[in-house]
Amino acid sequence: MFSRRQMLINTSCGFGALALNNILLGDDVTHFAPKAKRVIFMYMNGGPSHVDTFDYKPLLESKNGEQDPTNKGRKLMTPQGKFTAQGESGLMMSSFFPELSKHADDLCLINGMKTDSGNHEQARTFLHTGNFQFVRPSMGSWLVYGLGTENKELPGFITINAGIAPEQYGSAFLPATYQGTPVNAGNASKAIPNLFNPRLLPQQQRDSIDLLNQINRLKLKNDQVNSRLEGVIESYELAFKMQTSVPGVMEINNESPETLAMYGIGTKETDAYGKQCLMARKFAEAGVRFIEIGYGGWDMHNDIQNNLTKRCGGIDRPMAALIQDLKSRGMLSDTLIVWAGEFGRTPGIQNNATGRDHNHQGYSIWMAGGGIKGGMRYGSTDDFGHKALEKDRMDMHDLHATILYLMGIDHTKLTYRYSGRDFRLTDVYGNIHHSIIS
């Protein structure tokens, strides 16, 4: 027997779903028993080099400086980090991640990723929305549309200094209540622009919102179906509640000195990303469904050794801390962590460059928690890291389908009718990769 929300999902009805946005996630409102309740998406803007981080290629070491057999005129460049076996699983990981390597047995390294574009903007949009040609709802928006939120006083989808454009966290043709809410880490009272009203006291705001809601509900009663107006009503209510809920969740001074040190907060190299990771844990704990945190600077066409040292050094300790913190709180098992850039980098370099170019034909991401098998290497690229091999290759629609499955959703049934067509995150594609699911 289907719940009302399941009926909405199965019959592709966008209207009415807003009224169910406060339902808590459970087996009775999903297509499958969910492995995860929430997603923390770590977006690495610029395309990290897989052959220097998570995709071990010993031939690049032995053939360093030789001509790239795939790209004439380029020379192969050895991995910039030293790869060693980590954990009981023996996962090969780079020396750029000494802290994350301690959690190797929690990670699934997906070494056979492939995307459809080697241009940053298109690949970035494809990763976030499942389409790079047209404006589409973002992955987080689809999840909140399908599952709702666990906290009526917080948005279901939050981005924390993610470094992405509005169309990459927007809801497009889905009701506006499902779009991501951008949050600035650092100052809790100024985390969201224009959240506070300097001219009205809280009770005056409450009275004003109540009057507006009465007028809007009269209009809604006459229209019978108006998802945009429903979104306006919901957004007013949520914004009012967020004035007290957001600063409370973002306050990090109530964390122990040991926790702050574990995340690297207070240390120049790791302070910024440490705060993002800690806030991601706090928002996850508070019931936010989809949280995205970002870290840029991975577009390394030159001086890749020094740049990798800085970039990896800025995220290694905070990422390890997040995994450990979630685990110690019993949350890692139902929190899906996804680490990904929009594409990878080439094994060869051009002329006298000291960096790597874009490579969308094969690269690496990793996942942990939320029903993912740990200590696993899944898929592969060729001997030098140019292309993902056909066996166990994961395309972008496959990634999205698998994430939705882990959250209990059949990607073929999470649809929204717009302009006479049923749209979905995975378009008409997508295969679930059950081999990485525990």
Image: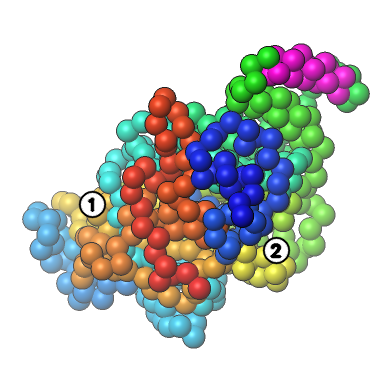
Question: Residue at the location (80% across, 17% down)?
Answer: 214
The mark closer to the camera, 2 or 1, is 2
From the image, tell me which residue sits under label 2.
261
Q: Chief secondary structure of the magenta span?
A: helix
Q: Residues within 10 Å of mark 1 (few under 14, many from 20)?
A: some
- Which is nearer the eye, 397 or 241? 397
Q: CA distance from mark 2 to mark 1?
A: 38 Å
Could you tell which of marks 2 and 1 lies nearer the N-terminus? 2
In the image, is residue 36 above or below residue 199?
below
- 219 magenta-colored: yes
Amino acid at pointer 2:
Ala
Is residue 45 in view?
no
Q: Residues within 10 Å of mark 2 (few under 14, many from 20)?
A: some
Magenta-drawn segment: 205-221
- 353 magenta-colored: no
Is residue 112 in view?
yes
In the image, is residue 324 above or below residue 424?
below
Residue 425, image x, y percentages: 43, 43
Is 35 positioned to the left or the right of 76 in the image? right
Residue 36 figure quarter:
bottom right
Is 342 positioned to the left or the right of 408 in the image? left
Question: Residue at the location (62% across, 37% down)?
Answer: 17
Residue 332, image x, y percentages: 63, 66
